[in-house]
């Protein structure tokens, strides 16, 4: 009997071991980030000490020391009495050098000298001469440095409506309005001035302004406790210039009411936010639904259109003066504290002249610094409201006297010729509406780049073309404009809370989806294996919204932002923020934790090993300027997030991150004003393409009516 044996079993060789996850080398980005933070904090502390010591670049004259000492220590009546006792000839030769004087006293003294000279028949420069205008404008620039450095009462040096007779010397006053007549001409070079009027009417008194503000704010702030609160910006300008409710300018119909909290801790500030929300809801029509939205810059309260939105700016400041000093455009540097209107001297001057004065702060200002940079849409928006952009004679002269002389007017003329020629050759002047953002590049990157949309804007104003003045392009440096909860969602008659909730959900899902589409393999290495990214989808919350403020400030609604960065830096950032939290009396908590549960990444000693983390921002940590160290850590985390926007280009990420920090460093670097101006003017704009693609024409503009003031 034969036996049949089974064939021998065949064993497959064991599979090769799974290769360890490849390391993504950041080329020292963690160390670079730490150095950036430490250097920035050190530079800030040195600057604070310098301001406190009053260090200057030159040795002042004795008479200037005495005048500035008087301005800093004496009450206003004593200052004015002392100046009245000084011989007119001495005042005429020196008052423009006394930059610490309050603006109202300086203007009052100039007015007195002019009238006394006229009565006595002595010749003195006319109050409307170019030389006088130039001295006033240059004085204001220097005076603002003193306001930035001053530790005195925040009200000192600011302008109120009670000072209007002196700061607006050419006026007609009636019971209902004060009409300020503007100069026929101003020295320097002005652009975007075609909408500027020859005069402007403002409220004649503080009482009239209060009534106007109540009307334009729709009574939503009735019974508000204004202590430690200040509203500023476009809504205040609208209230100042409103004559009747029916005459309200169209540009302010959708304006938010921006409110700042000052002089409080984060815990106290959050109590104030609750009070603002309670006041807002109490003043709404019965049965009106409310909604509160939070992002990294603001908390915004919504009801129903057209009731105004109230927006709390998440920046802890010491005083209203600090709020005003941070404004980019001169005309916006005015605010209301519930009892008085306050203006910086440059805001009062902008009302008087119809122009914002250009400085390099508009280009390189930093949101953590005394004055933030502007955005193109704000420049053109306020040009449409009647406020152009003016380059002072000193800036123009600096170009002629530099090593490589430049001519501002010549550059403007050449750019106009090139721009008009390109428009004709490319479009043949079609009848469709153009958007002023059709040109390549960022318009504030240089003077010629700015002149291109300026020329098109002027052609629209002159009715040579149909031009949509909405400028939707923003700086690539910022994630979003600083003062918008979400500018992409339209605020108009079609607004619904349900629709906004859907929009918030889509925004929160958008980033994760984009990452998965760009580089799913890289996310797999961090524990995200699903096609929809469900492992982290619920953890991501770029925007949060809730029907009440109590819910919005609940931990469930904390902002949670995904970020891929070196694990080594996470240790450093969490520790540094914990130190700041302890110093502020807050409970220490980690701001960075692994995005996928059960993946313990923090603690690896490898400098370059990266991880996927969630950056959590609690209600206590949402306030800027709590501690400079926290601000700088957040700045670096935003730089990492911008670098993550190119997730699939791993080999380039270290260079991109370095570029992001370089941009931030450039924005806060204190170079010579005129040297920076010369480089900015001399920068060539991107080449104009002969046949741009239709999507680059910029004729299709978002239908969103929501825009920042």
Image (cartoon, rainbow, N blue to C red):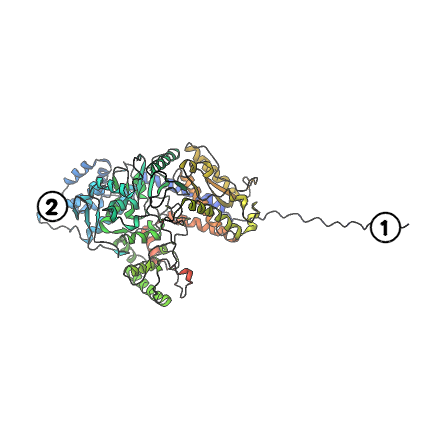
Of residues 251 and 318, which is closer to you in this image? 251
Indicate the position of residue 646 as horizontal and vertical percent values: 49, 52
Indicate the position of residue 380 as horizontal and vertical percent values: 32, 54
Which residue extends farthest right?
1
Of residues 403 and 280, which is closer to you in this image? 280
- 471 relative position to 537: left or right: left
Of residues 687 and 234, which is closer to you in this image? 234
Q: Would you say the residues marked 2 and 1 are in contact, meaning their CB atoms lie under 8 Å apart?
A: no
Q: Residues within 10 Å of mark 1 (few under 14, many from 20)?
A: few
Residue 459 appears anywhere in the view: yes
Q: Residue at x 20, y 37 (%)?
A: 76
- Looking at the image, is mark 2 or mark 1 nearer the viewer? 1
3D distance between C-alphas at marks 2 and 1: 131 Å
Label 2 SS: helix
Of residues 604 and 238, which is closer to you in this image? 238
Please name the residue that numbered disc 2 is placed on. 116
Label 1 SS: loop
Specify which label sits upstream in the sequence, 2 or 1: 1
Residue 585 against residue 55 in the figure, above or below: above
Residue 580 against residue 498 in the figure, above or below: above
- 442 relative position to 540: left or right: left
Indicate the quadrant where residue 695 lies: bottom left
Indicate the position of residue 454 as horizontal and vertical percent values: 31, 58
Residue 266's disc number: none
Please name the residue that numbered disc 1 is placed on. 4
- 578 relative position to 49: left or right: right
């Amino acid at each position: 009997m034969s036996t049949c044996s089974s064939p021998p079993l065949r064993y497959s060789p064991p599979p090769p071991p799974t290769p360890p996850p490849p390391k993504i080398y950041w080329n020292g980005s963690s160390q670079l980030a730490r150095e950036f933070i430490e250097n920035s904090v050190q530079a800030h502390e040195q600057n604070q000490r310098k301001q406190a010591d009053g260090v200057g670049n030159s040795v002042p004259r004795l008479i200037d020391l005495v005048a500035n000492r008087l301005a800093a220590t004496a009450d206003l009546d004593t200052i004015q009495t002392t100046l009245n006792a000084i011989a007119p000839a001495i005042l005429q030769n020196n008052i423009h050098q006394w930059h610490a004087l309050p603006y109202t006293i300086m203007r009052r003294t100039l007015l007195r000298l002019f009238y006394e000279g006229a009565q006595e028949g002595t010749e003195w420069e006319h109050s409307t001469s170019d030389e006088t205008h130039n001295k006033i404008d240059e004085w204001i620039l220097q005076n603002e440095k003193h306001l930035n450095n001053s530790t005195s009462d925040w009200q000192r040096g600011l302008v109120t409506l009670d000072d209007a007779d002196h700061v607006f010397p050419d006026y007609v006053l009636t019971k209902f309005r004060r009409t300020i007549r503007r100069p026929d001409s101003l020295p320097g070079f002005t652009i975007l001035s075609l909408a500027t009027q020859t005069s402007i009417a403002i409220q004649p008194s503080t009482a009239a302004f209060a009534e106007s503000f109540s009307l334009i704010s729709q009574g939503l702030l009735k019974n508000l406790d204004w202590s430690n609160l200040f509203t500023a910006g476009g809504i205040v300008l609208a209230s100042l210039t409103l004559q009747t409710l029916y005459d309200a300018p169209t540009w302010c119909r959708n304006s938010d009411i921006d409110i700042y909290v000052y002089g409080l801790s984060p815990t106290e500030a959050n109590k104030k936010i609750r009070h603002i929300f309670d006041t807002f809801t109490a003043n709404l029509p019965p049965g009106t639904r409310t909604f509160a939205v939070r992002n990294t810059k603001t908390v915004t309260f919504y009801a129903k259109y057209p009731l105004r939105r109230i927006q709390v700016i998440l920046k802890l400041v010491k005083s209203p003066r600090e709020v005003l000093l941070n404004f980019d455009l001169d005309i916006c540097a005015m605010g209301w504290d519930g009892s008085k209107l306050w203006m910086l001297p440059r805001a009062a001057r902008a009302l008087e002249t119809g122009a914002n004065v250009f400085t390099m702060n508009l280009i390189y200002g930093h949101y953590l610094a005394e004055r933030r940079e502007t955005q193109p849409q704000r420049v053109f928006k306020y040009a449409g409201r009647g406020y152009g952009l003016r380059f002072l004679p000193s800036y123009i002269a600096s170009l002629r006297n530099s090593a490589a002389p430049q001519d501002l007017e010549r550059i403007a003329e050449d750019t106009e010729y090139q721009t008009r020629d390109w428009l004709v050759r490319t479009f043949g002047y079609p009848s469709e509406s153009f958007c002023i953002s059709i040109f390549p590049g960022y318009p504030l990157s240089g003077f010629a780049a700015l002149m291109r949309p300026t020329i098109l804007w002027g052609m629209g104003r002159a009715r040579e073309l149909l031009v949509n003045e909405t400028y939707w392009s923003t700086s690539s440096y910022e994630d979003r404009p600083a003062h918008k909860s979400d500018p992409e969602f339209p605020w108009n008659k079609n607004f619904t809370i349900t629709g906004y909730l859907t929009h918030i959900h889509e925004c929160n899902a958008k980033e994760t989806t984009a990452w998965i589409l760009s580089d799913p393999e890289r996310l797999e290495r961090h524990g995200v294996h699903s096609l929809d990214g469900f492992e982290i989808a619920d953890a991501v919350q770029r925007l949060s919204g809730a029907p009440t403020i109590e819910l919005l400030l609940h931990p469930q609604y904390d902002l949670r932002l995904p970020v891929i960065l070196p694990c080594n830096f996470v240790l450093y950032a969490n520790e540094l923020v914990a130190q700041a939290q302890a110093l502020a009396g807050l409970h220490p908590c980690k701001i960075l934790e692994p995005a996928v549960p059960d993946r313990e990444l923090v603690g690896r000693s490898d400098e370059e090993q990266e991880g996927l983390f969630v950056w959590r921002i609690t209600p206590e940590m949402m306030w800027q300027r709590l501690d400079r160290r926290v601000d700088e850590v957040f700045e670096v985390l935003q730089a990492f997030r911008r670098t993550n926007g190119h997730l699939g280009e791993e080999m380039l990420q270290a260079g991109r991150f370095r570029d992001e920090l370089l941009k931030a460093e450039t924005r806060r670097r204190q170079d010579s004003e005129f040297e920076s101006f010369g480089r900015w003017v001399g920068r060539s704009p991107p080449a104009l393409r002969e046949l741009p693609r239709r999507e680059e024409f910029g004729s299709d503009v978002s239908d969103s009516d929501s825009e920042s003031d």
